[in-house]
Image: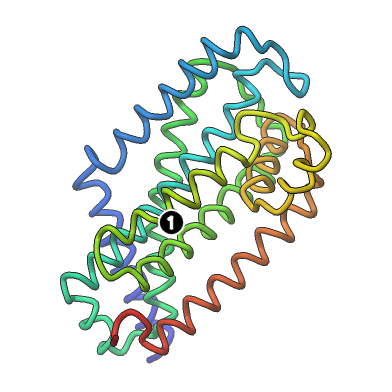
Amino acid sequence: MNISLNLIAFYTIVRKEVLRVIRIWIQTIVPPAITMTLYFVIFGNLIGTRIGVMGGYSYMQFIAPGIIMMSVITNSYGNVVSSFFGAKYGGHIDEMLISPMSNATIILGHIAGGVLRGLMVGGMVTIIALSFTNLELKFPLITFSMVLLSSIVFALAGFINALFAKKFDDIAIIPTFVITPLTYLGGVFYSINLLPEFWQSASKFNPILYMVNAFRYGILGTSDIQINYAYIVVITFVIILFSLSLILLNRGIGIRD
């Protein structure tokens, strides 16, 4: 299949994914916006006034980048895992597999859809955050590149989860038992400098820590980790997860079983 036809196939998948998000916006856009607003009200206004300054900024300013990144991560993941598993469950994944489009195009199309939903929700949460506090955006390139790479990582993770899932309950296991704990332990609501030395070291095995801190650095200019390490970690995850997704899809894992 030539490049132009692959591009058409890619555009078709992305268009389908975006229309799906917009069509059921009451499920895809509104709930995360409400949830993140509650985070700002509870953690920012109520608890933040008691905590005071963290990292040289008000607590509301400090947690805002982490909450934005959390919304991007969860929605990028959720969009791909639900969409691709739905394609498996409905049987129309077979139409894509027997078409001339490459497996890489199938992956990239779904990943792009997940990224777009993540960015849409992240943009809405950013607007909500600005109604609570001021965000400066000190390093735009770092901010946008990190949110994009992080969204890709979790969209790919959602794709892999969808491949292995055999029933709808399976697509909720990873978000509940992996992503949520890693997010809360990833420096969204606190600086790891407050932790004992052992737990600071343990936290550095959490990839979300690097995503949140690099994103926070892009907006506020403060971070608990070195930014170059963050890019190394996140780009490594992108390469590994994309390669794994392609290998699994080429072998028909979870599809031809």
Relative to the observer, which residue lies in front, 81 or 1? 81
Question: Where the C terminus falls, by quadrant?
Answer: bottom left
Q: Nearer the viewer, residue 122 or 86?
A: 86
- Name which residue lies at 29% across and 43% down: 28
Spot occupied by residue 99 in the image (x, y as percentages of width and height): 26, 87
Q: Is residue 229 above or below residue 41?
A: below
State the residue position of label 1. Answer: 174
Give the quarter of the figure containing the N terminus: bottom left
Q: Residue at x 28, y 70 (%)?
A: 166
From what the image shows, is residue 237 above or below residue 134? below
Q: Please identify the quarter of the rendering in which residue 3 is found.
A: bottom left
Name the amino acid, label 1. Answer: Ile
Q: Locate residue 185, reporting x and y percent.
A: 61, 40
Furthest residue in direction left, as rendered: 90
Q: Residues within 10 Å of mark 1 (few under 14, many from 20)?
A: some
Residue 79 position, x and y percent, is 35, 54
